[in-house]
Amino acid sequence: MLRAESGRGGLVELRVARWKRYGHDRLYANLPDGTAVGWADVSTGDITILVADYRNVVTAVLTDHLRQYPGPVLPRGTSGAEARPTLPPLTPADDLSTNRPGQSLRDLLDRSGPGLIERVVARLLRRPTEWDSWRRGLEGERRVGGELDRLARHGWRVLHSIPLADHVDVDHLLIGPGGVFSINTKHHHNKAVWVGDEAVKVNHGKPAPYIRKSRTEAARVVQVLERYCGFPVPVEPVLVFVGVTDLKVTATQLGVRVYQERQVAALTPLSGVLTAEQVEEVYSVARHRRAWSKA
């Protein structure tokens, strides 16, 4: 573990780990909780920053570590592009672009939702159930999905409810000229939300790990997209709160964008990260269910 000063002041501890899979050879710089904040390609020396607040320290740490690795030499006539895995032709069954916002929750409610008697009993007893939580989550994803779909006219691509390997999903993925955004929706109707550097509190309750989980999710998205794309794909985590009465952000080293649902339009003018061709290539990978099967 290395300890150094971050770009915003204060000390940050980083662990550097080597990762070799799918034809890639990388050094990842991780926070103590395992969140990846940057990585370096061992063969080319290129460094990708995942969390802007750690840019300087990640660059310094990974540059130092790269000196220990001369980098593999590819056999004559081969290239890094040829070593990348490819996806099979896209079929309707594997096309995630048809997913509606909250698709995973819709399917869950269809499979495991309550019957009429169970709904009546729960309502009479005024007893909150897991189904209520699923319905609130579904409503939140619907509202945020509707706001994101408006960005399509500005050159952005939107995907909803992307299933990962461990029975969780990415609520929304926004892909466009400003990069890629992994969006996590939280519906807290008529509640006040406070956001700090590492925790979120709802109505002054216990800290929730939304920040850490959002960063971890974005890191997983990076690994999937760059496995199949021939260029770095920066992914920013985003937290969108739905139905809250107040949203207060006091963080100074957050590394996660935080919005209320109608504020996601602030992403519209962002540009200069991906070309139009790269947007389409990333989108073609991201919409393919097989790309996420081992994420």
Image: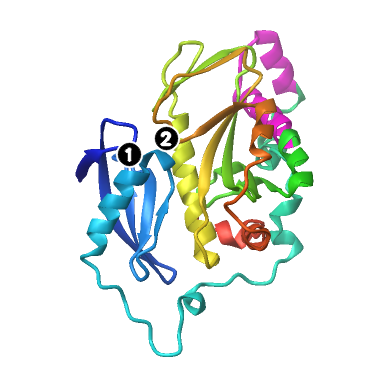
Image location (x, y in percent) of residue 286? 62, 56
**Residue count near mark 2 (Cα–Cα under 10 Å), binned few <14, some 14–19, many ≥20:** many
92 lies above or below 83: above
Residue indicated by mark 2: 212
> Was residue 125 drawn as part of the magenta stretch in this picture?
yes
User: Residue 33: which disc?
Assistant: 1
Residue lying furthest bottom: 76
Q: Position of residue 1 (x, y in %)?
A: 20, 46
Residue drawn at the location 32% of the way across and 48% of the way down: 58
Question: What's the magenta region?
Answer: 117-145
Residue 118 at x, y percent in the picture: 70, 22
- Compare marks 2 and 1 and give the one earlier in the sequence: 1
Q: Quadrant of residue 88?
A: bottom right
Label 1: state its secondary structure. Answer: loop
Identified at 45% across, 13% down, the residue is 205
Which secondary structure class fits the magenta region best? helix
Mark pair 2, 1: CA separation:
8 Å
**Secondary-structure class at tag 2:** helix
Q: Are marks 2 and 1 in contact (CB under 8 Å)?
A: yes
Residue depicted at 71% across the width and 38% down the height? 148
Residue 89 appears in view: yes
Q: Amino acid at mark 1?
A: Asp
Q: Residues within 10 Å of mark 1 (few under 14, many from 20)?
A: few
Q: Amino acid at mark 2?
A: Arg
Drawn side of residue 91 relative to residue 225, left or right: right
Q: Position of residue 21 (x, y in %)?
A: 40, 66
